Image (spheres, helix red, strand yellow):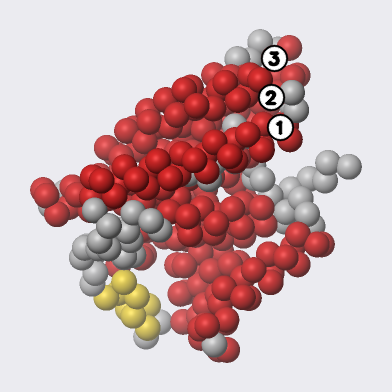
Amino acid sequence: MDVIITGLLLGGTYALIAMGLNLQYGMARIMNLANGEMLVAGAFAAFWFWTGGQISPLLTVFLVAPAAFLLNWLVYVVFLRPLVRRARSRGQLEVDSILTTFGLSFVAVGLMLALFGGDYFSYSYLSVPVHIFSSTYGANRIAAFAAAVVICGALWLWLNRSRAGMTIRAIAVAPDSARLVGIDVMRMAAFAFALGGAVTATGGALISTFLTLDASTGGLFTLKALVIVIMGGVGDVRGTVVAALLLGLLETFVATVIDPGLTLAAAYLVFIIVLLVRPQGLFGRSTS
């Protein structure tokens, strides 16, 4: 039971890390390699508000999310929209966006190093034990898991039950057809990209309550998010959640039962198997 609960809590953390990239890549069609830096920036903001004014990270997210939304909107308009306009194919857009956001990730790291320095940062928030089935878990991890459930559930409902959400899905599935029915594809793509950045920064603020970070750790989160998004199926919120939980359970099982040093190897082995068997992801649809 301890392995299952710990794995689910870790999976919830992974869902927070990956959900923003899923929106940006799955809906706006931008493979954002600077996504992890946005997560670290959100964590920095939570750290700064907590150490400077004792403002709870659970409240900080209401400041971080709109700020990140605005910042990502500007990034899309200034740096990415020109790429979208000149791209003659989806493949060209993916290559151009990968190269551009790869450069932006270094810009973001440099700015964070200049503003906050290169030291690791962490703080104590809700670091009290909670007893579940005779085992002990951190309250901050449980709070982050609960937030992940709320955020992922709200996104799924919004994308599948609201008119705006279905519009976003339309531009992801068939942008040319979406234009024919009067949808402003460019504006909705910018909205999806900005929303993904806001979700990522919110996730960063929440996981900063129990993870130690520094300005250069964003790349690790981008890589983990990419694995989860591709495993679950690009653009599928349900698939991202399931992949995140499976990865959390797998890594916890390997670390507890076999060897902690084999967790990454096991995770990437499963990732390769999924790519070989279902290249479209667990919940993705084949394009053939």
The answer to whether residue 122 of the structure is visible from this angle is yes
Q: Residue at 75%, 28% (x, y): give it.
A: 89
Q: Tell me, yes or no, whether the two marked residues, 2 and 1, touch with CB atoms within 8 Å.
A: yes
Categorize mark 2 by other alpha carbons within 10 Å: few (<14), some (14-19), many (20+): some
In the rendered image, the quadrant that contains the C terminus is top right
Q: Secondary structure at mark 2?
A: loop
Residue furthest to the left:
53
**Can you identify the residue that label 2 sits on?**
87
Residue furthest to the right:
288
Type of residue at label 2? Ala
Type of residue at label 3? Arg
Q: Residue at 62%, 24% (x, y): give it.
A: 84
- Label annotation for residue 179: 3
Type of residue at label 1? Gln
| Residue 66 x %, y % | 34, 32
**Can you identify the residue that label 1 sits on?**
92
